[in-house]
Amino acid sequence: MRLFAAVLPPQAVVAELAAEVDRLRGLPGASRLRWTGRDGWHFTLAFYGEVAEERVPELSRRLERAAHRHGPFGLRLAGGGRFDRAVVWVGADGGLEVMRRLADSAAAAARRTGLSMDEHRAYAPHLTIARNRTHANLRPYVDALADFESSPWTVEQLCLVCSNLPTGGVVGERPRYETVAAWPLGT
């Protein structure tokens, strides 16, 4: 199973982001980008990659413990940016320090389970909305996101998500995401 730990925005916030993305898709050159679907919008805390089925129960136990060590926190989508010329993302505002600690705990849970986290990087909260298929200039999208803010919400759970990669060979087909488990934050 291809797994990652994540924070998922509530549907009302997803709807707000969808309206903003619709506006961005109206910008010149937007068809040159591959836009992510709203069902895939999430903040990845720790990416685990392929995890053997027999390791999932232990990983789940450790993630549950990690969730209980961190209380709920406020968050909102805010602004945006890009990673080089490859990705356009929406940022976050609010309890970012709590979210970073939660991300660190999610990575530690994997290491204690025996999963390799060699490629784990310092946590940078972002929600990917588009990938660059060509050499399109991403600056107009970043500029358009500068004043974007969603309604605030309280993050109340840590989720373990399975990413099912496309297998059909269909152009534009996206991964399907399935929440495998979720644990409330705090005790």
Image (tube, rainbow, N blue to C red):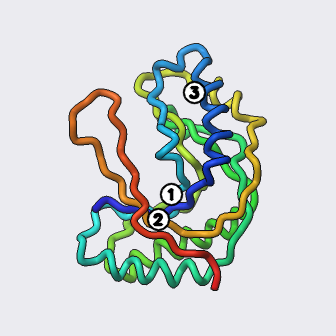
Secondary element at tag 3: loop
Q: Image check: 41 left or right of 164?
A: right
Q: Image check: 88 left or right of 58?
A: right
Q: Residue at x 52, y 62 (%)?
A: 45
Q: Which mark is residue 44?
A: 1
**Crowding at mark 2 (Cα within 10 Å: few <14, some 14-19, many 20+):** many
Give the amino acid type for the residue marked by disc 2 in the picture: Ala
Q: Are marks 1 and 2 in contact (CB under 8 Å)?
A: yes
Q: Earlier in the sequence, mark 3 or mark 2?
A: 2
Front residue of 52 and 87: 52
**Number of numbered tags placed on the structure image:** 3
Q: Height in image: 71 above or below 135?
A: below
**Crowding at mark 1 (Cα within 10 Å: few <14, some 14-19, many 20+):** many
* Residue 77 percent coordinates (x, y): 69, 48
Q: Residue at x 54, y 38 (%)?
A: 129
Q: Are marks 3 and 2 in contact (CB under 8 Å)?
A: no
- Split into 4 quadrants, where in the image is the C terminus? bottom right
Name the residue beneath numbered marker 2: 5
Secondary element at tag 1: strand
Look at the image and tell me whether residue 183 can be seen. Answer: yes
Q: Height in image: 39 above or below 34?
A: below
State the CA–CA distance, disc 1 to disc 2: 6 Å
Query: Disc 3 or disc 1, which is closer to the eye?
Result: 1
Q: Kindly indicate the quadrant of the structure image that contains residue 79.
A: top right
Name the residue beneath numbered marker 3: 138
Give the amino acid type for the residue marked by disc 3 in the picture: Leu
Secondary element at tag 2: strand
